[in-house]
Amino acid sequence: MSKIKPNCAVFNAPAGREEHPAVLRARNGHEVALKGVKVRGRLQGVMAQVEVEQSYTNPQNTNIETIYTFPLAMGATLLGFEVEIDGKKLAGSVVEKKQAERRYEDAITDGDSAIMLEEAGPGLYTVNVGNLMAGESAVIRYRYALLLAWQGDQLRFMLPTTIAPRYGDPLADGLQPHQVPTASLLVDYPLDIAISVEGELAGANLSSPSHAVAFERSDTGTVVQLNRKAYLDRDFILILQSETAQSSCVLTADRDGYVALASLRIPQCKNAAQRPLALKVAIDCSGSMAGSSINQARKAALEILNLLRPQDYFNITLFGDKPSHLFPALVLASAQNITAASARLALLDADMGGTEMENALKAVFSMSAAKEDAAVLLITDGEIYEYEKLVQRAGESGHCVFTVGVGNAVNDVFLHALASATGGACELVSPQEGMAERVVMQFHRMRQPRLGALRLEWPGKPEWQTPLPQAVFAGDTVQVFAGFLQPVDGDVSLVIEGSNGVPCQIVSIHDAELPRMAAAQRMSLAGDTAVLQLALDYQLMSKWTNYLVIAERADKADDLPELHHVPQMLAAGWGGVGDGSIISYARSSVQYCELDAPIVMRSARRAAVDAMGKSGVDTYDIPSFLRKQEDGTGSANSAMATIKSNFTKSTQSGPAKFMSNFANRYSSLFGWTKLPDSVAELREIEIDDEIACALLEIVDLGHDEAEVIAAFIYALSESAIGVKFSRLFKRTILKRWKMVVKNHEIDSEMKESLAMVTLEAWNWQFQAAENCI
């Protein structure tokens, strides 16, 4: 067994961890094990603090790199990352992203173990465990904090557990190939949860619409635990209901200053005249909605018809591949129109193909309306990629979009973003929750008079303040962070134009994590440089930073690790195949069991899952080099100049053809020893003659040929061309370079010769090998 030398602080592991083996046999016959996930949480005030423990084992007889992409709730701030591997406990640190990636790859190619946590996209994170040795175990622990917001008399705590298959191209959405989640019907990952509800919240009425739970009194409050087996196939939801809920404002020290969090509830509107509606309803009928989601959508649609009044206008659009309007335009909510709509909606099914949501919303926004202030009510599971442009265009449409997310694994980040950008509101509904209640809440928001502009009045002037929301509704909560140089006391007041203010006394507390949460909120307002500095100063995950742990080994791994993805459990009820007897049938029919992202379920009545295939990359934009060079002096300089010059040839020949041949021949081969080590091998894949002669000139100066070729290939991988290489291909090249290149003078000259690469002119295309991604 290889030994690890810890190089950072250690954390004590919780005692008595229960092991739950859940082994997947992948297509290539290898086994990967995610034993299960344990969650411990603490709810107090409007703060949720959560620790998640993921347990892994490598049952192979060789070292592996296991990769798992998992979800976090919208607004969660990661606060800690710890690793236990081969009995050693190591603490992660936040490192600038490019530096973290390079240090991770260096450790892997040096034979050490490395663990890296990276942000894959909004609400998505990927943990990479590199060089997990044969028979070795690893435990990953991460901590995060989350602000909860009162809506009326309820707080809703949600713990996402799985990522349902999404429609669209994950690579176009910014995910790297290794980050793309896949789903499988062949795996069961056990889930263990215990949530401690403390302080005033301990007296709230507690319930979970998603899981069977039990309650136990403790010294600090009430502990909520699962009372039957559970798995990572649905979001865990805990509802806290209290009539005594109130606003709060706390102040704590933050380095040389102070930070305050104001959580202020807007009073309910009493006796306010409710305005008529001009309502455009959009209902997702794509394949992923099959099963419990479409049943929820049907209930919601029929409830909407019940809530309409004769003076309201409405229309309903059903969409999948294409949108279909029930009426040509908005119509009065007459008895005749309600009856016609009810007859159609009673037959609602998830049989309209893929989730082309952008086209659907465009059709809804352009629909003629009897009133300019028409609202949109969108009912969907939100399972799409590439939604950021959609959110932006919706914000420019002039429509308020109110979203209702349905299903066991809703894309809450997207639905909240869409509602926020348009001045609407978001409600999430699990299959066991009351749909009518959520629809009523959205109708209440849409009918109430618009609240005036908001502002916060502090007893002292803040140095900074996070933005107030552009649109709020009665009964909702406004949460704002602010920073001060000196402590402040007294009251903070939320002033609403045309209404009475909402005052709240500021209370001083000691909370080390609150300033970090405030910094995470401030990052969304800062420029790139300031964001990176905030992330490093407060040790926060971001698009610009990763968590990293390096576990140095006394006995190094000799080979590069085999790549193993941990698939998602398919969300219960997703596509009509993720729950009950259907999933049992699917597990007995292997050809229908494994789903690969992106997937589109075209109909609930289909027995098979129609997969779009692995997310390989078929086409790449090809890099071109700036046609700028200096004449070199001496043979080596002249050869380098030749290399640089010849990498500016047209797309029809020269380096474009060579790079395509190089990637196609070698990217699918495992093992750094298989890379070319002679000019003759490069000629076989049609390297330009002048470049070949230039490389031979360098060899003739007395340099080792294999070293020259390794330096040349490594320089290509480190140039802008390298972004088009798969992660494993680049790692293979790096391993070869480390083993072969000793003369780093020629290495640096080679890299300098290729440093002017851009991604503008070439049309280099190659099919990336599936097992290379």
Image: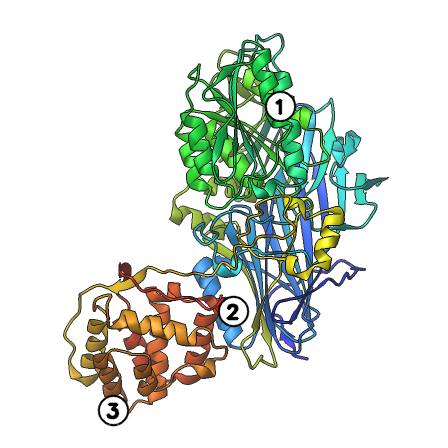
Compared with 498, 713 (above or below) is below
Mark 1 — residue? 343
Occupied quadrant, residue 715: bottom left
Occupied quadrant, residue 559: bottom right
Question: How far apart, in angstroms, are the residues tagged by discs 2 and 3?
Answer: 38 Å
Q: Are marks 2 and 1 in contact (CB under 8 Å)?
A: no
How was this image coloured? rainbow
Residue at 18% from the left image edge and 85% from the top image edge: 635
> Considering only order in the chain, which callout, 3 or 2, is on the residue closer to the N terminus?
3
Compared with 556, 52 (above or below) is above
Instruction: Look at label 1 and name its amino acid.
Output: Ala
Question: How far apart, in angstroms, are the residues tagged by discs 1 and 3?
Answer: 84 Å
Q: Residues within 10 Å of mark 2 (few under 14, many from 20)?
A: some
Image quarter hosting the N terminus? bottom right
Residue at 29% from the left image edge and 62% from the top image edge: 763
Instruction: Look at label 3 and name its amino acid.
Output: Asp
Judged left or right of residue 377, residue 54 is right
In this rendered view, identify the residue nearer to me: 22 or 345: 345
> Considering only order in the chain, which callout, 3 or 1, is on the residue closer to the N terminus?
1
The reply to whether residue 300 is visible in this rendering is: yes
Q: Position of residue 253 (x, y in %)?
A: 57, 40
| Residue 771: image tag | 2
Q: Position of residue 8 (x, y in %)?
A: 60, 65
In this rendered view, identify the residue nearer to me: 491 or 312: 312
> Considering only order in the chain, which callout, 1 or 2, is on the residue closer to the N terminus?
1
Q: Secondary structure at mark 3?
A: helix
